[in-house]
C-alpha cells in the first residue's frame, strides 16, 4: 500500500499543471455547492423559526393598508396604518377565534442609537401572546413604561454584542428608555423592531413634539389572532374578511410565502450553477485524467513488465483520481466555509435582511457530505481509465507509448 501511495504522489508531482487544473475545476464546483447547500438549509431554518415565533395563526390589518402591513410584519419596515380599536371585539367574536391581542405601529423617527429609522411597536404585555410569553419570562418582571424590548438586528447594530445591551439607555423621540431584554432572532420584522408598552406608545405620540400626528387610544394597527384547536386558518380568515370588510386577514403561511419564494429562487440559481460546475468539473477532470493515463502508457507498461500486476495498476490509477478529487473537494469546502464565515453579513443583505444562517454543526455535516461526494465522483471518473489501462498487455502499452 505504501508503494502505491508513493508512486501516485510522484506522478502527481510531475504533472503539476494538469493536476491543478483538475483540482481547480472540482474545487470550484464543491465551493459553489457548499454555499448553495448552506443557503438552502438556512431557508428552512428561517421559515421554521419565523412560523414558531410569529405566535399567531392570523393577523388582521386595515384593508386599505395590506401592502404596508405585510412590509411591516415581514421586514420590519417603518410605516403607519390605523383602524378603530373596536374592530378587535368584532374579530374576537368571529367563529373559530380563541383570543386576540392588538399592537400599535408608530412612525419611527431618526434616533441617536441608529443610522436609520427604527420601527416602534406598542403592545399590551398582559394580553399579548406573540412575543410576551417567551420574552417577559426572560425579563423576569413586568415590562415597565420606561423599558423597551429590542429586536436582535437593532441591538446588534447599536452595541454589537447583545449581552452588553441589557440596561443600556436609548433615546427615541426625545424620551429615554432602558433596554429590558433582547429578542432572539425570529426571521420576521420583529428583528428590526423596538417594542414598548401600549400606554407608552400612545403617550409618546401626544407628548413628543417630534411626532407629526398624535395617535388616539381608540386606534390600533394590527390584530393578532389565535384560533381554536382544529380551526382551519384559510377558512377562518375568509369568514372574518366576509363579516368584517374593514380588515384584511393574513394567515401565517401567507405572510411568509412571498419571502419563501424569494429565498428559494435564489438558492435554485445557486444549485443550478453548482450542478453545471459539477458537470463541467467531472467532464474536464475525466477527460484530462484519461489523457494523462494515455500519455503514461509506456511508463505503466514498464511497471507491468517489471512484475506489477493488473490489480496494482488499477489501484494506482484509481488512487490518483481519488487524491485529485479529494484535494479539490477539501479546498472547495474550505473556500465555501470561509466565504460563508467572512461574507455572511454581506450575503444576508443580498438575500434579504431576515435570513438566518443554520447552526454551526450543519456546516461541518455539509462539508463532510460534499467531500464524500467529491471522492466518489473522482473515483467514478478514474474508474474507466484505470480499468482500461490495467487490461492492456505490457508490450502493447510500451509500444503505444513510444
Image (tube, grey):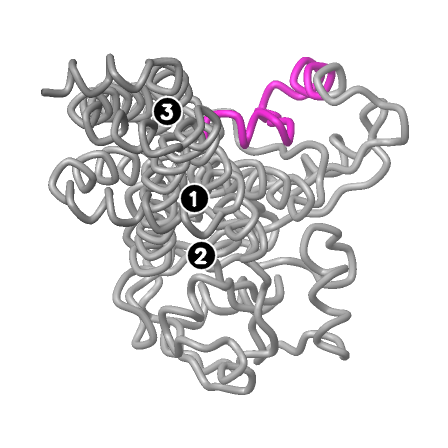
Can you say whether 393 is above or below 124 in the image? above
Circle 2 or circle 3, nearest the eye: 3
Between the residue at mark 3 and the residue at mark 1, the CA separation in whole angstroms equals: 50 Å
Q: Secondary structure at mark 2?
A: helix
Q: Main secondary structure of the magenta part?
A: helix
Give whichever of 109, 154 is nearer the camera. 154
Q: Which residue is mark 2?
A: 192
Mark 2–mark 3 contact, CB under 8 Å? no
Does residue 78 appear in the picture of this structure?
A: no
Q: Quadrant of residue 275?
A: top left
Q: Residues within 10 Å of mark 1 (few under 14, many from 20)?
A: many
Query: In x, y percent, where is residue 243?
Result: 71, 16
Q: Is 171 placed left or right of 167 in the picture?
A: left
Q: Which residue is mark 1?
A: 75
Q: Residues within 10 Å of mark 3 (few under 14, many from 20)?
A: many
Residue 243 included in the magenta stretch of the image? yes
- Residues drawn in magenta: 237-259
Q: Quadrant of residue 91?
A: top right
Can you say whether 232 is above or below 175 in the image? above
Query: Looking at the image, is mark 2 or mark 3 earlier in the sequence?
Result: 2
Query: Looking at the image, is mark 3 or mark 1 earlier in the sequence?
Result: 1
Residue 381 included in the magenta stretch of the image? no
Mark 2–mark 1 contact, CB under 8 Å? yes
Q: Secondary structure at mark 1?
A: helix
Q: Residue at x 47, y 38 (%)?
A: 370
Q: Which residue is mark 3?
A: 382
Q: Secondary structure at mark 3?
A: helix
Can you say whether 345 is above or below 197 in the image? above
Query: In x, y percent, where is residue 400?
Result: 16, 14
Query: In x, y percent, where is residue 323?
Result: 37, 42
Amino acid at each position: 500500500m505504501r508503494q502505491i501511495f508513493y508512486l501516485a504522489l510522484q506522478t502527481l508531482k510531475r504533472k503539476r499543471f494538469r493536476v491543478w487544473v483538475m483540482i481547480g475545476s472540482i474545487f470550484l464546483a464543491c465551493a459553489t455547492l457548499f454555499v448553495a447547500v448552506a443557503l438552502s438549509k438556512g431557508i428552512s431554518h428561517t421559515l421554521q423559526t419565523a412560523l414558531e415565533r410569529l405566535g399567531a395563526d392570523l393577523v388582521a390589518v386595515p384593508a386599505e393598508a395590506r401592502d404596508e402591513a405585510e412590509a411591516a410584519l415581514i421586514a420590519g419596515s417603518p410605516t403607519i396604518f390605523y383602524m378603530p380599536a373596536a374592530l378587535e371585539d368584532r374579530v374576537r367574536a368571529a367563529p373559530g377565534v380563541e383570543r386576540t391581542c392588538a399592537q400599535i405601529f408608530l412612525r419611527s423617527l431618526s434616533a441617536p442609537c441608529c443610522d436609520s429609522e427604527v420601527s416602534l411597536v406598542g403592545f399590551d404585555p398582559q394580553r399579548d401572546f406573540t412575543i410576551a410569553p417567551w420574552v417577559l419570562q426572560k425579563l423576569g418582571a413586568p415590562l415597565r413604561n420606561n423599558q423597551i424590548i429590542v429586536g436582535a438586528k437593532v441591538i446588534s447594530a447599536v452595541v454589537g454584542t447583545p449581552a452588553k445591551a441589557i440596561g443600556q439607555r436609548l433615546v427615541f423621540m426625545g424620551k429615554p428608555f432602558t433596554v429590558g431584554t433582547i429578542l432572539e432572532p425570529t426571521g420576521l420584522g420583529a428583528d428590526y423592531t423596538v417594542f414598548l408598552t401600549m400606554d407608552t406608545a400612545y403617550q409618546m405620540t401626544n407628548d413628543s413634539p417630534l411626532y407629526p400626528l398624535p395617535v388616539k387610544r381608540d386606534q390600533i394597527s394590527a390584530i393578532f389572532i389565535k384560533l381554536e384547536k382544529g380551526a382551519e386558518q384559510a377558512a377562518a380568515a375568509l369568514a372574518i374578511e366576509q363579516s368584517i370588510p374593514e380588515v384584511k386577514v393574513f394567515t401565517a403561511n401567507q405572510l411568509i410565502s412571498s419571502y419563501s419564494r424569494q429565498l428559494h429562487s435564489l438558492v435554485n440559481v445557486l444549485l443550478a450553477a453548482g450542478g453545471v460546475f459539477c458537470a463541467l468539473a467531472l467532464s474536464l477532470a475525466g477527460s484530462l485524467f484519461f489523457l494523462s493515463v494515455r500519455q503514461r502508457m509506456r511508463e505503466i507498461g514498464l511497471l507491468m513488465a517489471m512484475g506489477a500486476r493488473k490489480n496494482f495498476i488499477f489501484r494506482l490509477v484509481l488512487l490518483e483520481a481519488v487524491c485529485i478529487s479529494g484535494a479539490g473537494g477539501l479546498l472547495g469546502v474550505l473556500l465555501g466555509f470561509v466565504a460563508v464565515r467572512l461574507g455572511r453579513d454581506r450575503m444576508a443583505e443580498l438575500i434579504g435582511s431576515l435570513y438566518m444562517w443554520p447552526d454551526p454543526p450543519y456546516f461541518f455535516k455539509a462539508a463532510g457530505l460534499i467531500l464524500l461526494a467529491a471522492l466518489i465522483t473522482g473515483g467514478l471518473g478514474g474508474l474507466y481509465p484505470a480499468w482500461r489501462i490495467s487490461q492492456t498487455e505490457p508490450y502493447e502499452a510500451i509500444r503505444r507509448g513510444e
